[in-house]
Image (cartoon, grey):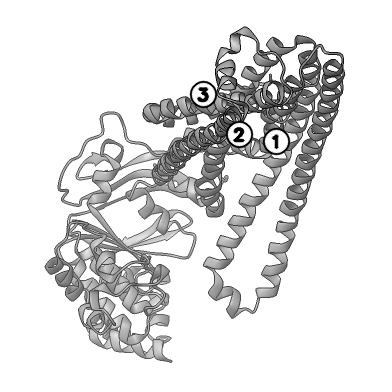
Amino acid sequence: MPESRKQTKARFKHLVLNHLAGQKGGLLVAACCTLLLSGADLFRPWPLKIIFDYILLNKSVPHHLSFVRSLLGMGKIWALVLVSFTIVLITVVKGFAAYSQMHITSRVGFKLAHSLRREIFNHLQKLSLSFHQKMPSGELLTNISFDTSSLRDVFSEFVLTFASELLTLIGMLVVMLFVNWKLSLIVVATVPPLIFLTFQRYRRIKASAKRQRKAEGEIASRANEVLSSILVVQAFGREEYEGERFENQSVETLHESIKTARMEAAAARGVDIIVAVGTFAVILVGSLLALDGRMTPGNVLVFASYMNSIYGPIRSLAKLSTKFSRAMVGANRISELLDLEPDVQDQPDAIDPGRLRGEIAFQNASFSYGEGRTVLSGISFRVSPGEHVALVGPSGSGKSTLTALILRFYDPQQGSITIDGLDLRDIRRDALRREIGIVLQDSLLFGTTVRENIAYGKLNASMEEIINAATAANAHDFIMELENGYDTALSERGVNLSGGQRQRIAIARTFIRDVPMLILDEPMTGLDVESEAAVRDALRRLMEGRTCILITHDLQSAAEADRILMLGDGRITDQGAHSELLQRNQEYRELWKVKAGNGAMKLRDITEAPKALFLANSVVRQS
């Protein structure tokens, strides 16, 4: 067996058995129900044999069936009623066993799916940012929903059907060999071609299911990408274009689905033909033996009744081969996902330093995403506790990457980064990120209430703390104007609020954390003048007394920082206070003149009149 197939089967067994370890009691009851169900199937045709042979045809009763003699002693009518009633009794017992088995096994199967989904979801949250940036989200959603469901189905349906019928098969073979071993050989002779046909089709179905699963993951990714960007799609009128792209991808899944269905149907029909030939041979030979007096008609009836049941496991395997194939593919993909380790991990001796002061230092730090281009090269600077530092530079100069290193989404390939003198690698990631608040350009809100969105920064926050944070963020007044105030449910990503309102809720969410360090990534982008004033005022309060790293293209915001770092091509090209850069850096001076209205204001006026600068900046924005 190829090594990959061995690994797949080993992963499948590990996934199922590991998650079923806590369900031993339920599985034991299900096993007992399975035995009871198989016993009911074995006894089901025997009342008919007794009726035909000993009541209707008056055959002599063997010595080992003395209870039949006792029934006949009560009269044939009573014997017929009692024996016929056993058919109802067997059916009731079988129904109870089947119901109990299905209920227990299905419950265990759903718990298996729940446990797997929880483990996958928690594991995905731990994987590094680089993984999520490369992996399509639709593929991950398919792992959580489709793959776990396929494992649930293969357990609750395949095990339920196949295990009980396999026991029935063994029991029926034993009974038939006891009744007439020659006739039983005909039944046994049909088993090898059935097994060959089933497993030959299984291999082909499995390969097709693997291709189908890959195509379904791509479709889920495409749908998720388009629907999450529906504003852009509709604004550019690209509905038809995206529909065609989706259809082209869906065609592959369509073809594979049809191919799989065709192979499944062919396998089922092949099994039916072999079963029909076997049934024909058994009934023909059995009837000839009955006519010759070497077999009773009741025994022929028992054999005929067993025929459908004895081929059940193999026929079921042919029908369930598609689901089993998908489950094997899904188990492999889930195992591969769970085998992944985060690129950034805590050191075994990493510590929780408690409250940090917020002194950040880069020491010759370099970083590359592995695409042959260095994003940051030899970065060295120090930020004192409570200092506000602005990062300015063209897009792609490494500003966002620099802050991602502080949050330890990545580790530098060279150099080091320290906070309060501690290397970030020596600090637990959860402890580090607990001390840092972020406000992003695109305020990410959740589809829940305003109150819960603010409290996301501090899950055990009281209502008073939430209101205080919202007030400090200039958000309380507009929140109270919403339909249900703080209990107003937001739509996904908070799109039912304006950009300024979303940003102020995000600031409130950071306010409530009360952290010593802040990372602000273009927090003023895309805001109108009124919203910008409210957000700027809220940010000033938020930044007070905290170490702050501000990424911005807005030189007005940068000018208010204690120090400005100018980045270009992954390096710090210059740094200093706003007034210092105006004096010595021609590039910064030219940019500032453009910002201030194409040099309409004199440098002396600019440096001496920050209020006038703010007004000039507003005029430029409005024009």
Query: Tags 2 and 1 in contact by the CB under 8 Å rule?
Result: yes
Give the image quarter of residue 280.
top right
Which residue, given by chain and number where applicable, does mark 2 sit on? 328
Q: Secondary structure at mark 2?
A: helix
Q: Residue at x 37, y 48 (%)?
A: 405
Which residue, given by chain and number where applicable, does mark 3 sit on? 35
Circle 3: residue type: Leu
363 left or right, relative to 236:
left
Circle 2: residue type: Met
Q: Residue at x 48, y 56 (%)?
A: 569
Circle 1: residue type: Lys
Residue 21: x %, y % from top left: 40, 27
Q: Classify 326 as above or below 557.
A: above
Q: Secondary structure at mark 3?
A: helix
Give the image quarter of residue 8.
top right
Q: Closer to the observer: label 3 or label 1? A: 3
Distance between mark 3 and mark 1 Cα atoms: 31 Å
Dot label at residue 206: 1
Residue 603: x %, y % from top left: 31, 82
Distance between mark 2 and mark 1 Cα atoms: 8 Å
